[in-house]
Image (cartoon, rainbow, N blue to C red):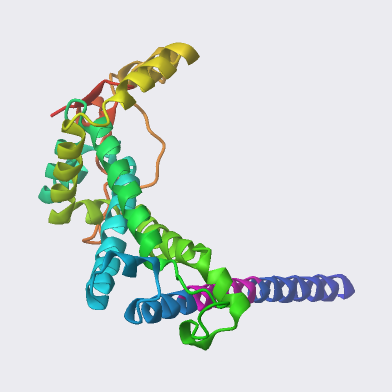
Amino acid sequence: SNDDQDAIKEEKQAQHGQEFTSFRQAALYWIRVLVSFAFVAYAMVVTFAALMNTQTTMYHTGLPNYVSVVIFLCLIGFLGMLEAMQIALFAVVNLPEKALRRHPVAQANCELAFTGNNFQAFLIGRQMFVTFSMFLLARITTTDVDPDISPVTVLGMPPTLQNFFNTGLPGALITTVVASLAWRIIAACFPVEFMASPLVYITIQSCLLVEATGIFSAAWLMADGLKVATGLRNDEEYLGSMGQRGHSHGGHGKAEVDRAPLECSDGSDDSGIEFEEADAVRITGYGATTSQP
């Protein structure tokens, strides 16, 4: 009938419109990716060229060129590790311990991070390392060529572009994309696998050691002052404990958590694991971090 033909025609038009929209979205996505990659790649090439020709602010230190390159690469990896660890720890904080038992190294790292006040101490030490790394990366990635004095610019770029690189903004792009965002995305997608790295344990211990020096202990006092000034309270005072929330939903001491199954590295999932309060490794509030066996 004519009605059926019209319905089929409209359905085909709708499908065609969806395909066009999907193609347009994919095209715009890849255009953005390629433009961003081109900016980062050019900034990296200029940085390496400037390092090899002693044209960055790092050459004032008197270090050989190749040493500056090695420091640059090591700082990229170290800063990426610090950025990713924060994301991974927040991602695994409420996972059942049964899920972590599949990864003994990840479990050991989590137990270290969430014992006592270790998590807050880790954040303090981590931030010191992040600040230190960014300071050095700024020195390494900032070019130092005055086109009004020196006729030789980095890779022969125009004076206007050279002045732009002298601001350090291209170096900030490298630090943001290569040493931060890429690592954060990986850690958000694979938090348990990331926490299973032995380097994580060493990094946590290093951050705890830095905090233990006491140089940054004023942060604890300032946090206490902010807590009192703003009237902050633990989440349990607003939401109740996990067991209480389980009882309020008709459970028997178990919190009913509506969540998607955790995909494991072996292809299975943890949909058969009951999320009990006794299984949780979690932060209970400011200054009160617990790890329950």
Q: Is residue 262 visible?
A: no
Q: If the image is split into quadrants, where does the N terminus sit?
A: bottom right
Please say if 155 is above or below 285.
below
Residue in view at x 25 percent, y 66 percent: 71
Residue 52 pos. (x, y %): 32, 81
The single residue placed furthest to the right in the displayed view is: 2
Image side of residue 32 versus residue 100, left or right: right
In the image shown, does 33 or 160 lie closer to the viewer?
160
Please say if 18 is above or below 124.
below
In the image shown, does 159 or 206 lie closer to the viewer?
159
Is residue 44 on the magenta stretch? no
Residue 92 pos. (x, y %): 29, 43
Image side of residue 176 versus residue 243, left or right: right
The boundaries of the magenta stretch are 25-40
The single residue placed furthest to the front in the displayed view is: 149
Please say if 275 is above or below 109.
above
